[in-house]
Every structure is written in structure tokens, then in C-alpha cells.
Amino acid sequence: MSNEPAAPAIPAATIIIFRNAPEGGPPQVLMTIRSKGMVFAGGMAVFPGGRVDPADFALGEAVASSGAMTADEAAHQIAAVRETLEETGLALGLAGDIDAARAAQARAMLAQVGALAPVLEAFGWQLDLAQITPFARWFPKNEKIPRVYDTRFYLANLGTGAVDVSIDHAENTHLFWTTAQGALDAAERGEIKLIFPTRRNLERLALFASYEEARAQAEAIPVRTIMPQVVEQDGQTWLTILTDAGYPVTAELLENAARG
């Protein structure tokens, strides 16, 4: 057993982007396939997102001065906005003169400067974090994973969703829209791979017939940090989560659980 202290958790944010299904039925969410070479969740289907950068924390301090939320929470929401623009080309959580062409220009600038604040200044945009709803927080400690992420999940809505998305080519290989149940079914067929937190969140999302239902549940259930636990029961080893956090499935056999 190593006596070295565990590496600190990496703060991260991910965003579950809804759109109305083009032909009716349950809403769709946007997912991406991470490049196989990525250290964490390589080759897995996940929601767009990534780590919270120092520049996000700096901008979060400015947002917190208004008293609307803590600097830490603001930084995570800002990271969700930035990563969405970076990974998908969608300008969510922003207000101002925004159209497809300007969003594409802003995305290109973001790729060069690596921070959201200069982009906002250049395009005359403002943050509109009211578009972002806190949904969950996962901190799956695992000594076998070299990088442990403390990830906050958020919801956002495109409504009709009549917009184009495109991958960033750096971390992702494919973007696709799917219902939550459709993603779970695709995983069962072996078409995509899901890590434990993504699977649990998709099961939760599959409960909702609309974005409004998802947001209502998110606002009704306070966000608590979910730290999966390994437990022994009836001679089997299970990976379990909180039973009162809104998730319909709260345990999976450890041997079946993909953990990153």
C-alpha cells in the first residue's frame, strides 16, 4: 500500500443539454464520445463538460460579488458554459447579440485565448446563468483511477433545438442527440459505453417526459455530493449510491460497473 497522499480531486462541470424531439416523444439530450486516448473515460459516451480552470474561478469571483451565488458555484457554472461553447459550438448560459455565425466566431476565439472573459468582452455578451439549473454532484473516489473528478452536473434547454453542433476534434470524436432511454438501450446493445455516473444519470433522466419535469425535480431535490460506496451483500459486491437523491437505480454489481 502506498503512503503517498491521494491526489486532490479535480473540480469539473458537465452540462445535460435538452432539446425537444424532432418528431415528438421524450426529449433528447446531447452526448459526446470521448477520444479513446483520453486518460479519463476514454472511448465512453458522456455529457459535454470538463475541468474548472483558474480563469473560471477568477470570473466566478466577479459574478459572486453580486451575491447571487458563491464564487465556487459560479466558477462551475461558468466552466459548464465555456465547455459547452468549446466542445459543441452552442452558446448556452449567455445573453446578447448571439447567432450561429457569432457563436462560431466566439468558439474560434475561445480556442485561441482559452478563457471565457475575453470572449464576453469582445462580443459584448453577458453571462445568463439563470439558463443553467444545478442537477447533481458526483465525486466517485477510486484508487484505481489516476484522476479523480468532483463533477457538478447542470441542466439547460434548447427548446426546439434547431441548431448545428460540431465536435472540437481534441477531446471528442462524435456528438449525437438521443433520448436518455435510447442511450441506455444503445449501451445494452454494445453500441456505446457508459461509466457508472453517466448510466445512473441517464436512468434518472429517462423518468422525465420534458425538460420542465427534469428541472422541477432538480429544484425540488437539494444537490448532495454522491460518493459511490462498495458494499457486500448476499455474497456479492455492489457499487451503491444515495437512495434519496432522485435516482431510480441506486446499485450495480461492481463487476459490471465501468468506473472510468
Image: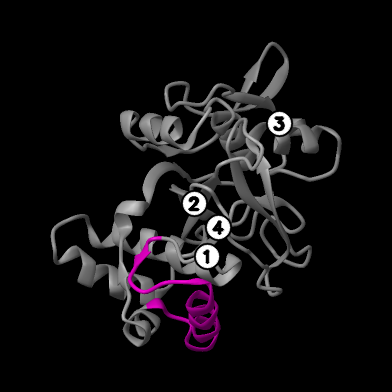
Asked if residue 9 shows in the view, the reply is no
In the image, the segment drawn in magenta is 93-116
Q: Which residue is mark 3?
A: 254
**Which color mode does the image show?**
one colour
Which residue type carries mark 4? Answer: Asn
Q: Quadrant of residue 253?
A: top right
Q: Is residue 184 left or right of residue 243?
A: right
**Lower sequence index among marks 2 and 3:** 2
- Is residue 113 found inside the magenta-colored segment of the image? yes
- Give the alpha-carbon distance from disc 3 to disc 1, as whole Å: 36 Å
Callout 2: helix, strand or loop? loop
Callout 1: helix, strand or loop? loop
Image position of 48 with respect to 212: above or below: below
Task: Please give the name of the residue rendered at 14% of the width and 67% of the height, measured from the top-left corner.
Answer: 65
Q: Which residue is mark 4?
A: 3
Which residue type carries mark 1? Answer: Leu
Task: Please give the name of the residue rendered at 55% of the width and 72% of the height, measured from the top-left corner.
Answer: 86
Q: Quadrant of residue 58?
A: bottom left
